[in-house]
Image (cartoon, rainbow, N blue to C red):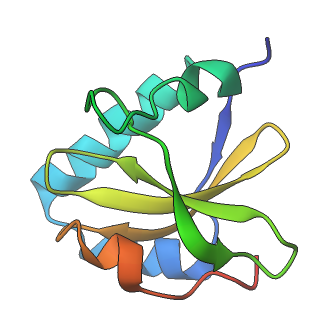
Amino acid sequence: HELVECDLEFPRIRQELEKLEMNELEQVEATIEKIQQMTWDQIYKTSSKTQKRGLNWEPIAGQQTAQGKTIASIRISEKFRARVCRDGKLMRFISFHPDHDSAYTERGGESL
């Protein structure tokens, strides 16, 4: 029951963090604090097609990293999502999507 650790060191994430508006950055920080108090089991349980709640972990069909790890989307806010993957106990952030829908269509981060 190990807690999840967040990795925001992917180069694209570093660049995107600098471009976020203050309220978006605060939402990211609050989400990371929440994630770091959860286990992977708890994160997976937030996935739901019928009941949108919490992080709402959603694997994205057809998106994988170069190492074959599934890329998923998580909720930062109602309209703001992030693309992430699991690497052991780490949740590696790949990209931020303040417009929500682009999280499902965009590529990038697959070199992780």
**Closer to us: 24 or 97:** 97
Instruction: Using residue 38 as the reference point, say whether residue 88 is left or right of it.
Output: right
Dividing the image into 4 quarters, which one contains the C terminus? bottom right
Q: Is residue 14 above or below residue 28?
A: below
Q: Does any portion of residue 29 appear in the rendered image? A: yes
Query: Residue 19: x, y in percent?
Result: 26, 77
- The residue closer to the viewer here, 108 or 6, is 108
* x 52%, y 65%: residue: 60
> What number of labels is visible?
0
Residue 39 visible in the picture: no
Quarter of the rendering containing residue 102: bottom left
Against 98, residue 89 (above or below) is above
Q: Is residue 3 left or right of residue 14?
A: right
Q: Position of residue 6 (x, y in %)?
A: 62, 44
**Res 55 quadrant in image:** top left
Q: Residue at x 49, y 73 (%)?
A: 14
Residue 74 percent location from the top left of the image = 42, 49
Vertical side of 94 occupied by 53: above or below? above
Q: Nearer the viewer, residue 44 or 95?
A: 44
Residue lying furthest front in this view? 50
Task: Tell me: 112 left or right of 107.
Answer: right
Quarter of the figure with residue 36: top right
Residue at 20% from the left image edge and 44% from the top image edge: 77
